[in-house]
Image (tube, helix red, strand yellow):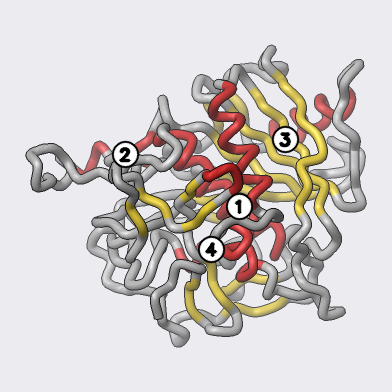
Amino acid sequence: MQKKPREGHVLLLSLFCLSSLAFSWSQDNLFNQAKNYEGSSDLVDLQYHMGPVLAAPVSLYIIWYGRWNQNHQATIRDFIYSLSYSSPYPSVADWWRTVRLYTDQTGSNVTGNIVLSGEFSDSRYSHGGYLSRLAMQSIIKSAVNAHPRALPLNPHNGLYLVLTSGDVQVQDFCRAVCGFHYFTFPTIVGVTVPYAWVGYSGTQCPGMCAYPFAWPKYSGKPPPSTNGGNNIMRAPNGDPGVDGMISVLAHELAEVSSNPLINAWYAGDDPTSPSEIADLCLGVYGTGGGGGFVGKVYKDYWGDGYNVNGVKGRRFLLQWVWNPVKRRCFGPNAID
């Protein structure tokens, strides 16, 4: 998920399905949706269900599945670094402070210390070019059992990210989901650890999973601009696929941290179909967002859209998340 001041934006509808073994981030055509959660507390009943949050410092491990562009990898790494390191306000770390408001039953907050502790390249497509959702757990197992450069299997404070390249097809990717999170089964991996998957959509479905940096094919022509071109927002790091992927990744990291075992923070009575803290703010990137409008975000001289700053001068567009204190969607670029 991602954000900044701009125009129309397709809202994303998150589909959660326990039978599919993952809680997922997805997008649907909701241009005509009238409701706007930004600023609304009467529409949301977010509750704590007594499960753990990721309160201990997190050791993050990335599995690069497929063949990856090094520039794309560098952009994603810089986003991860930005979660814990200070940058000019409003920053990625400032955005993460809303996630940190969530606590467990001991009163411990979600951690602000996320360290990229290891990377593994699965450039040989060890599990093929088409993956089921459950296959993500087997990919993690392969990475922690590889020789000679295996990732550590860390059941104490490990979080695993499986990131698939643009030529890898994943079950329901581009059709129903852009990313998901869940936890591993001891029968497959040996231990229970939280993980998330996000796919690079730049070549498969940018209009589905990289909006507003690309336009959905089913929505007709993009809105015109005053100079005769179109009014699609430009990606702040130069690639709609990777900038869209970072927004989805932010969404999943917020939810896996506040609901790692699917028994902590979510709205709704059915744990097999919860609405988590980022689902409640789909399509909202700034003040006034909702109903097909991303909200007030920033644009630089070239028209690149963003709402937070990162390390090394990076800029990102991140979706807002639900603030349990303000009882509304919120981000550091809010103007009210």
User: In the image, what residue type sits under mark 4?
Assistant: Tyr
Between circles 3 and 1, the one closer to the viewer is 3
User: Which secondary structure, mark 4?
Assistant: loop
Between circles 2 and 4, the one closer to the viewer is 4
- Residue at the spot of label 2: 214
The numbered dot on residue 89 is 4
Q: Residue shown at 23%/63% (left/top)?
A: 32
Q: Is residue 186 above or below residue 292?
A: above
- Residue at the spot of label 3: 62
Indicate which disc, 2 or 4, sits on the residue closer to the N terminus.
4
| 218 on left or right of 173 | left
Q: Residue furthest top?
A: 124
How far separated are the C-alphas under marks 2 and 4?
27 Å
Give the image quarter of residue 165.
top right
Q: Residue shown at 58%/67% (left/top)?
A: 277
Indicate which disc, 3 or 4, sits on the residue closer to the N terminus.
3
How far separated are the C-alphas under marks 4 and 1?
23 Å
How far separated are the C-alphas under marks 3 and 4?
27 Å
Q: Are marks 4 and 1 in contact (CB under 8 Å)?
A: no
User: In the image, what residue type sits under mark 1?
Assistant: Glu
Indicate which disc, 4 or 1, sits on the residue closer to the N terminus.
4
User: Which secondary structure, mark 2?
Assistant: loop
How far separated are the C-alphas under marks 3 and 1?
14 Å
Q: Nearer the viewer, residue 31 or 323?
A: 323
- Can you see residue 274? no
Indicate which disc, 2 or 3, sits on the residue closer to the N terminus.
3
- Residue at the spot of label 1: 252
User: Which secondary structure, mark 3?
Assistant: strand
Indicate which disc, 1 or 2, sits on the residue closer to the N terminus.
2
- Can you see residue 217? yes
Q: Is residue 298 above or below residue 236?
A: below
Query: Residue 86: percent from the left, percent from the top?
Result: 65, 57
